[in-house]
Image (spheres, rainbow, N blue to C red):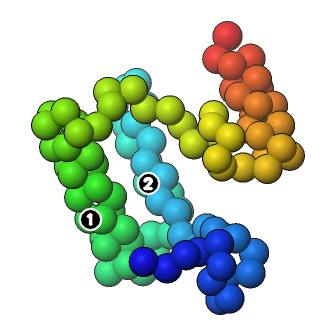
Amino acid sequence: MIDYARDPDDLHGDTIVATIEIKLRRNGAMSVAGSITDKVYALHLLDTARDTLLTYHAQQLLGNRSPIIVPAHDTSLVGTPEEKLLLNERHKLSNAMAS
């Protein structure tokens, strides 16, 4: 496995190169946005995400995973202090909008 922190091809860290966002609204409407113009690549991303979810839940049923999921941004292992501050402010804004 590649050590991404030392990979000379990625001098700027784990840069996100593609994203797909799926939203389901209360009324049942769904929207898909992001890197979806390349059909084959987008379907591969979705298939990989689905496989990851299935594997995670299968391992959880076997007792190999904790039932508690802690988001990466809530740990000291991921994110700079500036990123954590930005995420915190984003959560405050989101919570204010939900109220």
Return the disc, 2 or 1, that comes first in the chain's sequence: 2
Q: Secondary structure at mark 1?
A: helix
Amino acid carrying mark 1 in the image? Asp
* Residue found at x 32% / y 80%: 40
C-alpha gap between disc 2 and disc 1: 15 Å
In the depicted structure, whether residue 36 falls above or below residue 38: above
Image disc number at residue 47: 1
User: Could you say where residue 24 lies in the image, as x and y percent from the top left?
Assistant: 40, 36
Q: Is residue 50 visible?
A: no
User: Is 4 above or below relative to 84?
Assistant: below
Report the residue that reaches farthest toward the bottom.
9
Q: Residue at x 67, y 10 (%)?
A: 99
Q: Give the label on residue 64, or none.
A: none
Residue 47 visible in the snapshot: yes
Asked whether 5 or 43 is in front, the reply is 5
Q: Quadrant of residue 90?
A: top right
Q: Are marks 2 and 1 in contact (CB under 8 Å)?
A: no
Please give left or right for residue 81 compared with residue 31 in the image: right
**Front position in the image: 17 or 38:** 17
Image quadrant assignment for residue 42 = bottom left
Q: Nearer the viewer, mark 2 or mark 1?
A: 1
Element class at badge 2: strand
Kind of residue at disc 2:
Val
Circle 1 crowding by C-alpha within 10 Å: few under 14, some 14–19, many from 20: few
Label 2: which residue?
A: 32
Horizontally, residue 51 falls left or right of residue 19, namely: left
Residue at point 20%, 49% (across, down): 54
Q: Position of residue 32 (x, y in %)?
A: 44, 54
Q: Nearer the viewer, residue 35 or 51?
A: 51
Residue 79 placement, left or right of 30: right
Q: Where is residue 15 shown, x and y percent of the image?
A: 66, 70
For this orientation, the residue located farthest to the top is: 99
